[in-house]
Image (spheres, rainbow, N blue to C red):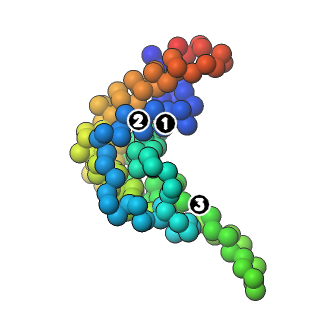
Amino acid sequence: MATLYDVPADALIEALADRLADEVEQPDWARFTKTGTGRELPPEQDDFWATRAGSLLRRVAVDGEVGVDRLTTAYGGSKGGSNRYQVAPARATEGSGKIIRTILQQLETAGYVETAEGEGRRVTAEGRSLLDETAGDVLSDLDRPELERYA
């Protein structure tokens, strides 16, 4: 049986986004919100919310008990420090905690993530089975000979 570690992350996240599209709903304010302090504009993808939900579910499963603060660091980036008059090094920026927190709350409502007291959030058995089932489907659809040993 294939697990989430046996398939490429981008293919798994795309398949999870298709499955989670009905269960997580993008709020109205999300169309106008940047995904982090280092960004200038909101995302232009139509399925951004479902894609981020799939990515977060995978990230929580891989990292174990993880909090929103650590996830904002993981989904952050860098912001260039130079402008016309001065040159400064790029600085690390954080991702949007509101987006991450809201998606995690929706995943909790769906039953895929649970809160671990004092430790953050972790994937439930139902969430793990969704990840493994999706990974199996992705592995069977992939046409990559180097991954045949996992099928």
Amino acid beneath label 1: Glu
- Disc 3 vs disc 1: Cβ atoms closer than 8 Å? no
Q: Residues within 10 Å of mark 2 (few under 14, many from 20)?
A: few
SS label for mark 3: strand
Residue at numbered disc 3:
77
Q: Residue furthest bottom?
A: 85
- Disc 2 vs disc 1: Cβ atoms closer than 8 Å? yes
Query: Residue 16: x percent and y percent?
Result: 42, 35
Residue positioned 51% across, 56% down in the render: 44
Q: CA distance from mark 3 to mark 2?
A: 26 Å
45 sits left or right of 121 in the view: right
Q: Residues within 10 Å of mark 3 (few under 14, many from 20)?
A: some
150 sits left or right of 134 in the view: right
In primary-sequence order, the first of circles 3 and 2 is: 2
Q: Quadrant of residue 102?
A: bottom left
Q: Considering the image in quadrants, where does the N terminus appear?
A: top left
Residue 13, placed above or below residue 31: above
- Name the residue nearer the viewer: 105 or 114: 105
Query: Residue 32: x percent and y percent?
Result: 42, 66
Amino acid beneath label 2: Asp
Q: Which mark is residue 18?
A: 2
Residue 139, placed above or below residue 64: above
Q: Which mark is residue 123?
A: none
SS label for mark 1: helix
Q: CA distance from mark 2 to mark 1?
A: 7 Å
Q: Which mark is residue 14?
A: 1
44 sits left or right of 65 in the view: right
Q: Residues within 10 Å of mark 1 (few under 14, many from 20)?
A: some
Amino acid beneath label 3: Gly
